[in-house]
Amino acid sequence: MTSNKDTKEANKNKYGNAEFFESVEKMGADFTENVSKFAEQWNGQWKNDQWNEQLANWYNSWINELPESFTQNAAKPTAFNLRKNLDDIVGGIGNAALPKIDTAKILEAQFELWQNYQKLWMNTTLGLMHWFGAESEGEDKESGLEVIKPDAEDYRFKDPEWSSNPVFSFIKQSYLLNSQWLRQMVDQTEGMDDAIRMKIEFYSRMIVDAMSPTNFALTNPTVLREMKETGGQNIIQGITNFLEDQQAGFDYMRPRHTDNSTLKVGENLASAKGSVVYQNQMMQLLQFAPTTEAVYKKPLMIVPPWINKFYILDLREDNSFIRWAVEQGYTVFVISWVNPDETYADKSFDDYVKEGIFAALDAIEKATGEKQVSAIGYCIGGTMLAAALAYMAANEDNRITAVTYFAAQVDFEKAGELLVFTDEQQISQLEPKVREQGFLDGASMAATFNSLRANDLIWNFVINNYLMGKEPPVFDLLYWNADSTRFPAQLLLDYLRNMYQHNKLSQPGGFTLLGEPVDLGKIKIPTYIQAGKEDHIAPPESVFKAVNLYGGPVKFMLAGSGHIAGVINPPSAKKYQHWTNTKKKSYTELEDWFADAKQHPGSWWEDWNKWLSKKSGDKVTARVPGKGKLKIIEAAPGNYVKVRS
């Protein structure tokens, strides 16, 4: 059996750099000598061997969690089995062409990693010597120079200990170096198509995010400080929180995001005054009570996504888009979709359009006497609305005279990281499950969306809830985010294959609705398109592609922030910014449009109102729910929205 000493000597000879290894060993010995002093100073409990054990355990756990062949063969470029690595990460790359391996670049990345670790050990040792020297002389403590720093917006390492404390600085930098190395290994691999590369990058980032030292109690200074101050009660409470969340249906991919006990739909959420004036098996139609004496002649119909509940547009009084639109003089109708069960398994796009959008248009005419309306479609509600408008255009149906899209995609070529989950292999694996259940449950969708922003929506709450032992904050938006709905099986599979996989709606005649091929180019009505600059669900580059698909006048506006905050941004908040472009030019790429755009501070709502008000007709006497041909069924927000998954 080969001893550790023999292995070290072999490595020295193999790589021809004995001096390097000897210097590392010396720095390691110096580091070990100083750690014991630091341990006594920092919390007075850990001994030298305990600190060494924790550092070693953390580093080894990080390395051991990576696919085996990454770590075993990384230093041997000629033996680096990339196909095995890709299979480990992605779960198989099928018949894709074997990626090209640039051994020189891989060797360069590996050598850079070794060099940076050499600098890191040296800087850490010097930092510890200065730390304890400063302690004895009463000077300010510093951890020493850093080889690598986190991005400025990376809030995970904001605790001062990550920079001022040599040991935690070492842990942080070691993690960042390993993360950088893994990204380089992926970036420097050639010969992959975009879909495979996106998968590898996504799952690599998932590994890197999961292995952050901030996610482990003994390598997170904030958690250790809390343990010291509470005598470990935070860990006990964290375990209690975890068990309670497990019983309530939460898990590590879906940790609890907010204190659910303080928020209630119909009371302090979705509380705008209105009534349900129509309902069928697919939806309830809400008409909201006017707050002005006169309103625009044309009502405003809002089509929200069916995978979420409509009250994202009516969270609180001070951020409710519905309330604000009513205050501007619009008669607002909103579709509140049913939360489908297994009996809806065979419902399709046709059913949602016919019994949703078209049924709502018929009901609005009965309620107000107005045949023509303007409409808003949010996210996939906008995708469906666009398909419906193309069908209406082909059939000379002019009931919708102006349309607005919030974060809605109709061309899915650049649909972002959700494409990771929508290739035929994964859809085929998903299909038997949803066919058996009759739907995709809300929890599965929530976990998928959380994974797109794992640090924000998973690990941030794992640390807060289970390591710090704290309750999550009361946050209306995150309550709504967790209040997801189910997705009917047939509709889901059709949507994934027709939109994400084959991008049929963007192709003239490619997508069929109610038995007819549709063409977005036949939509001639005025169109306002909103996109979020930081949207990770409907990327702005993807949303922008719709500009060149519609046949009528289009105004594109880019809002600051993302998929939700980029939409829900009332003028009173005075937050973020938005961009418009008034140049009479045609653009095929968002980047070129943005270069000519003008930035405006704050909300975009007033810009939209200025656009739509001119297209909404004259003012008429305000309409009260129940005064038309449709009577009140129940008060808003209705009962469909209260059915939880």
Image (cartoon, rainbow, N blue to C red):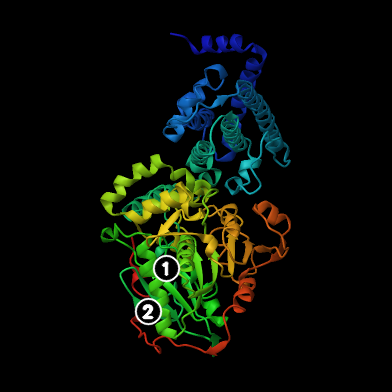
| In-front residue for pair 116/19 | 116
Q: Would you say 473 lies left or right of 541 here? A: left
Comes first in the chain, label 2 or label 1: 1
Residue topped by disc 1: 262
| In-front residue for pair 51/46 | 51
Residue 73, horizontal then vertical, whole percent: 52, 20
| In-front residue for pair 151/450 | 450
**Is 639 above or below relative to 245?**
below
Looking at the rendered image, the disc whose residue lies closer to the viewer, 2 or 1, is 2
Asked which secondary structure carries label 2, the reply is strand
Which image quadrant is residue 521 in?
A: bottom right
Residue 349, horizontal then vertical, whole percent: 38, 60
Residue 538, horizontal then vertical, whole percent: 53, 55
Q: Would you say 13 lies left or right of 70 here? A: right
Residue topped by disc 2: 276
Q: Check the picture and name the quadrant holding the C terminus.
A: bottom left
